[in-house]
Image (cartoon, helix red, strand yellow):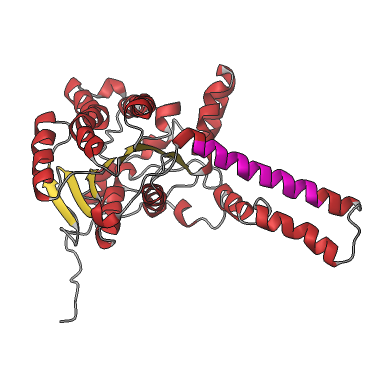
Amino acid sequence: MPTDFIRPPQRDSWFAPLSIDLLVKVLNTTFLHPFVAWIIPLCFRAQNLPWDTPRVLASIAWASFITLCWIGGAINRRVAFGLPREVDLSEEVIVITGGASGLGLLIAEVYGMRGATVAVLDVAEMENGESRGVKYYRCDVSDKDQVARVAREIEKDLGTPTVLINNAAIVLGKRLLDMDMAEIQRSLATNLLSHFYTLKTFLPALARSERGGTIVTMSSVIGHVGAAQLTDYAAAKAGVTALHKSLTAELRESHPQIRTILVTPGQLSTPLFYGVQTPNAFLAPVVEPVDVAKEIIAAVDSGRGGILGMPLYARWIDWFNVLPAGVQVVVRRLSGVDEGMKTFIGRRGAAAARPEKEPTLIRPF
């Protein structure tokens, strides 16, 4: 975990023992799983109940329904995202923007330890320094010339990139009236334009790869619903989501060997949103970076495209905009989505909250 991340003492949702996501996870591995569902009628038969008894028939109907849902889900993924590409970590060159800390650093270190070659692009130094398989490149991804220069260095040093993870982002946390033009330009350049720069720069290399490639786009539920004090961030993330969908449609026709993954998490417990309080720990739990990292890594490893949303409400957030406008206002007030940024401190506040003197680490010789 990043060393400069200190949680606000009032935040406790990350260790909340119960959330709707936990309940759904339990259900998906029990009553909503075909294997378990078919065990129930078998148990009834083991009790010598006839096949035509209501309990047996009901359990068979339930198991059949669950099985059809799982089959339908598999067909849906196949039609939507195609066949998986072949992934060999020893041959993969993974480029991660904003990988010097937080979620990007977790992904970089995991892939480095697993034998992949990782290039981290960031304006800040890597918190833990370069580790096995991970090489750091100082680069401001909002500057297209720096991105082009670093791309040439990566190709020369590490080889042809096969995976691009667009993770770099900044959060200002200010009202539109309180931002100056330079701040707006910097926010949109980092959160939106940088995606265009990296895609234009690295996509030709991914297209040249015989094994194809994978593009991971980090968006946010805020891009779907917006929030007070996040006008710039929400606009950028909405644009990123639209960019992903349009690019996926283009690549499906021109380069079907390239897979795209869209990630739309809720509130992450990273320094980027330090100080923000979740309105409801049960319905909207704060997402741990390690959980998001696991989902992204599993998706990249599988060679498939996909859409990853977490926690549960993030997977259904599109339905929010279908509600009548008045209902949306009521939901916003009840959820507190427009109140969360009032306690925002941000990455700089997190760094300032660190003790001035770090404890000495004693390592064995």
Which one is in front, 113 or 2?
113
Asked if residue 90 shows in the view, the reply is yes
The quadrant of the picture occupied by the C terminus is bottom left
Which one is in front, 134 or 257?
257
Q: Position of residue 169 (x, y in %)?
A: 26, 37
Residue in the picture at 56% in, 28% down? 331
Q: Is residue 185 above or below residue 9?
A: above
Q: Is residue 25 left or right of residue 117?
A: right
Residue in the picture at 19% in, 64% down? 358
Which one is in front, 160 or 298?
160
Q: Residue furthest top?
A: 325
Which one is in front, 92 or 275?
92
Q: Residue furthest front?
A: 210
Predominant secondary structure, magenta span:
helix
The quadrant of the picture occupied by the N terminus is bottom left
Q: Position of residue 316 (x, y in %)?
A: 54, 34
Start and end of the magenta stretch? 59-78
Q: Is residue 59 left or right of residue 315?
A: right
Asked if residue 229 shows in the view, the reply is no
Q: Is residue 191 above or below residue 274?
A: above
Residue in the picture at 25% in, 60% down? 115
Q: Position of residue 261 (x, y in %)?
A: 38, 38
State yes or no: residue 91 in magenta: no
Q: Is residue 250 above or below residue 299?
A: above
Q: Is residue 312 left or right of residue 181?
A: right
- Quarter-of-image position of residue 47: bottom right
- Quarter-of-image position of residue 114: bottom left
Q: Is residue 287 left or right of residue 55?
A: left
Q: Residue furthest bottom?
A: 365
Residue in the picture at 62% in, 43% down? 71
Q: Position of residue 338 (x, y in %)?
A: 44, 30
State yes or no: residue 68 in magenta: yes
